[in-house]
Amino acid sequence: MALLQFMCSVTPLARAARSRALVVSSSRTIVTVPTTTTAAAATTTKIKASLPDSNVLLGMSEEQLQQLATDFGQQSYRGKQLHHLLYKRRVKEIQEFSQIPLAFRTELQEAGWVVGRSSVHSSVTAADGTIKLLIKLEDNRLVETVGIPVADDKGSVRLTACVSSQVGCPLRCSFCATGKGGFSRNLKGHEIVEQVLAIEEVFNNRVTNVVFMGMGEPMLNLKEVLAAHRCLNKDIQIGQRMMTISTVGVPNTIKKLASHKLQSTLALSLHAPNQKLREKIVPSAKSYPLEAIMKDCRDYFHETSRRVSFEYTLLAGVNDDVEHAKELAELLHQWGPGYHVNLIPFNPIDGTEYKRPYRKAINAFQSMLESRKITVSVRQTRGLDASAACGQLRNEFQKSPLVIPSIDDITSSIDDITPSVDDIIPEPELEQEAAVAC
């Protein structure tokens, strides 16, 4: 009995459990089972808030943070304080949680909890004010995110964060730089959320819009994308209608997304009006026929009442002819209303022969769609000179992690390049030869 009492006193979690109930954890879902022995009470089980799989505070809801606080023997209002510190004050280290008792902060750290914020490795600013950030993740891989400011006629600024969902991309679309750089892993929910926070910090302004159009295919990481979407909406207070989730098309995922009934826009990267041409531009299209995609997009519209935006990258001499525009209009009319076409003039990248169409060809394509009653817009190119435009996100560390030298490596390198005394003081004949050479 003495040994049992000692073990129960080791952690705050155990103290909290002993005071009111036995706590059983399975897959981070906390379940309380009453300790009373009466038959009626024994049948009562209360399911508490499910905690995340990793010990990262960023991305947790207020309810989860309150649950965490009570599991550590704290009052639930401490969870509200944690929520305020994470999402209002944007504190990056647990020890900087000044409103939280030092003992609680220490207990969190000793239990392995972290805030979950990464550092900005570097940034590039384009002439139009667009800023691309390279964020260094915990495993030293780099992921790119872009902040795009647009001022309206009244002087107010709309700030859009273009966030990545994967480190690299496995789909290898022929016109996209990210796919050519290889694929490493999915991002976790908090690693998506922190991109928005980093953009807000560098611009010193609130992000008003979020587009999941950075590195990676969001539908291949749907669980974490939805977790990030929830946090951005509920905790950071960005409206669902201000967010767009993009996909090139992954079988069965559009249906799954529709089931969540989000009020966000689905953007489908179409890029061609027929299956044959689409397979040439988007290799993964072979596993997801155009007819199946269009059916899923129609069902998404009916399920959510949110129109689908079709992204169409214009490639000179490939898919930018007016006949392609006619075929695209016929395709959209065949599958009903609720669609919008967003034309994207190709942005140049290394390793491809694709060219950007002339303005005349872009205008002709747009006019043909409009003449057939298709709602269409042409995306304004932003961040081109910083390689931050659509399709240009790529870095050399998305496949392999950035190598950070150890102190021993740095010391060894210094020893290798530091000349010895004999190297500094030349022998007489060497000194004479040097003088002659001068």
Image (cartoon, rainbow, N blue to C red):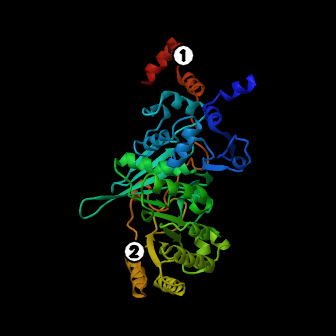
Q: Secondary structure at mark 1?
A: loop
Q: Dot 2: what SS?
A: strand
Q: Which residue is at a point 65% across and 70% down the rendered structure image?
A: 252
Residue 217, can we see it? no
Whole-percent x and y of residue 29? 65, 48
- The quadrant of the picture occupied by the C terminus is top left
User: Can you give x and y, in whole percent of width and height, for residue 330 in the image?
Assistant: 51, 87
- Residue 333 shown left or right of residue 128 in the figure: right
The picture places residue 25, in percent across and down from the top left corner, at 68, 43
Q: Residue furthest top?
A: 428
Report how far apart the C-alphas of labels 1 and 2 lie in the structure: 67 Å
Residue that mark 2 sits on: 377
Residue for point 67% across, 40% down: 23
Q: Which quadrant of the figure contains the N terminus?
A: top right
Q: Position of residue 359 (x, y in %)?
A: 37, 74
Of residues 267 and 433, the one nearer the viewer is 267
Q: Amino acid at mark 1?
A: Ser
Mark 2 Cα shell of 10 Å, populated few (<14), some (14-19), many (≥20):
some
Depth check: give the residue in front, 4 or 233: 4
Residue marked by disc 1? 420
- Does residue 178 lie above or below 420 as drawn? below
